[in-house]
Image (tube, rainbow, N blue to C red):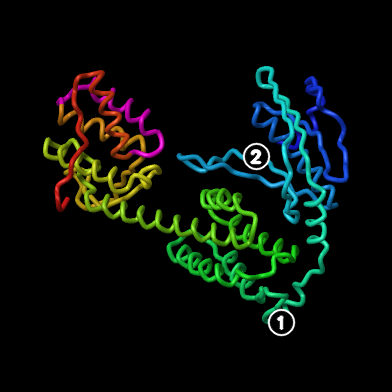
Amino acid sequence: MMFLAIALATAAGADKPAWVAVDYRSPEEWGFYCEGSGKTEAEALQAAELECAHKICMLFGVEVDAQTQSKETLKEIAVTSTVIERCPAVRVRGRKDKKKSVSCEESDCHAFLWQTYPKSEYDAEYARLNAPAISKVLEKTIIVIEGSKTFKDPKECREDLVDYAALHGESDAASTRRVEILQKAGKSCAQLDYRDVPLQTEFIKTIWSGTGAREVNASLFLAVRLGKESSVEGSVAALRRAEEEMLRARTKTEELRRFMLDHFDILKTPFADEEGIRSASKLYGLLVQKWPASLAQEIRVCAMRRVSRADTQDREVCFSLTPLSVRAELAQTACWLQARENQHCMQELYRALTEACPDLIDQACFQKASLRVKEATSVTIGFPTTEKGL
């Protein structure tokens, strides 16, 4: 973990740059000299930055909070994570990196950082943190007016966030309800006095509790979106956008399932005859055009069919679409139509599709792959066209 990297930094034996000194305080600023280690330059520098963040947190006498931060890739939300340290109650502004140095020996990297924090920013933040909390006042009065600003009662916002956190499951009904609640919370959680740190901390914890109980992929997806926000209002807005995006994706996936069932026999057995190959090629082209994002995951459907002549009644038959199977069917049907049973064409197109479309298969990456096939086999592969009504 990254916090271990800080503790082990000195043991790594890296030479300190000449500018590294001891932490200091002047009338204008604090100066911190921090170090960290890791397997890469980025990890080592992040460890040094975390040590500096820890020192600033300690200036205010607040507890340092260690959290796990996930990273999002085009293919999926990565399960790999990084431990970050922060003190969420403190709003740190104005710090500057004066000097930094990173050196590596193979996979053993060490970083040094000199960072300053202005005394004026510290004084302003200290005053804010120690201002009297007004949450109890807000609980008893509908509206609080302070100077030219008006602050609303947080009661409705709290109720909306608790309702959101209490919803479980990934059904369409639950997803629709979450979007409705977050749209409402976008209004009820605005114009509250978030100078009251306990109130803000309470609401942030409620939001995170609602994401932690979700299905793992949804939980990771939401954690990535929330990790970019620090305020209640920003978190509510980010959650609403993320929930709307997941609801749209679920709707598109269900639309794809219905399409697969409507064309079940052709998609499952595309090589029954030449007409079947032509129809399957067009269907796979339409799949790639209309549902590229949904095809990034496995989609499974089942239908009642008689599998053999010996069957006296229908039985359940299933098949799945995966990124691998879609690439394979596109390669086989397209090459068969253009060059009949040209195994070289099929192999080259499948390899080119795998390299050009590692995450999402769409028409643009198919065109790139077909150009590579033409260079290797002299076979021109056009993107499968569809007919009206298909």
Q: Which is nearer the eye, 195 or 123?
A: 123
Question: Could you say which is closer to the camera, residue 268 or residue 325?
Answer: 325
How many neighbours does mark 2 have within 10 angstroms: few (below 14), some (14-19), or many (20 or more)? Answer: some
Residue under the image location 25 percent in, 41 percent down: 284
In the rendered view, does 172 fall on the left or right side of 3? left
Q: Looking at the image, which residue sits at the far front?
A: 28
Counting residues from the start of the chain, the first of labels 2 and 1 encountered is 2
Magenta highlight range: 339-361
Identify the residue under disc 1: 141
Q: Is residue 140 above or below residue 131?
A: below
Q: Is residue 56 magenta?
A: no
- 92 relative to 331, above or below: below
Which quadrant: the N terminus? top right
- Under circle 1, the secondary element is loop
Query: Which residue: 75% across, 54% down?
Result: 90
Q: How many marks?
A: 2
Q: Position of residue 386 (x, y in %)?
A: 17, 45
- In this rendering, the answer to whether 356 lies above or below 74 is above
Position of residue 239 in the picture relative to residue 349 (left or right) = right
Of 46 and 344, nearer the camera is 46
Q: CB under 8 Å between callouts 2 and 1?
A: no
Which quadrant of the structure image shows residue 51?
top right
Q: Residue at x 45, y 59 (%)?
A: 244
Q: Callout 1: few (<14), some (14-19), or many (20+) C-alpha neighbours within 10 Å?
A: few
Q: Residue 94: give x, y in percent of width and height.
A: 72, 47
Q: Is residue 357 magenta?
A: yes
Inter-mark Cα distance, 2 to 1 = 42 Å
Q: Which residue, given by chain and number where applicable, does mark 2 sit on?
A: 82
Q: Give the amino acid at mark 2.
A: Thr
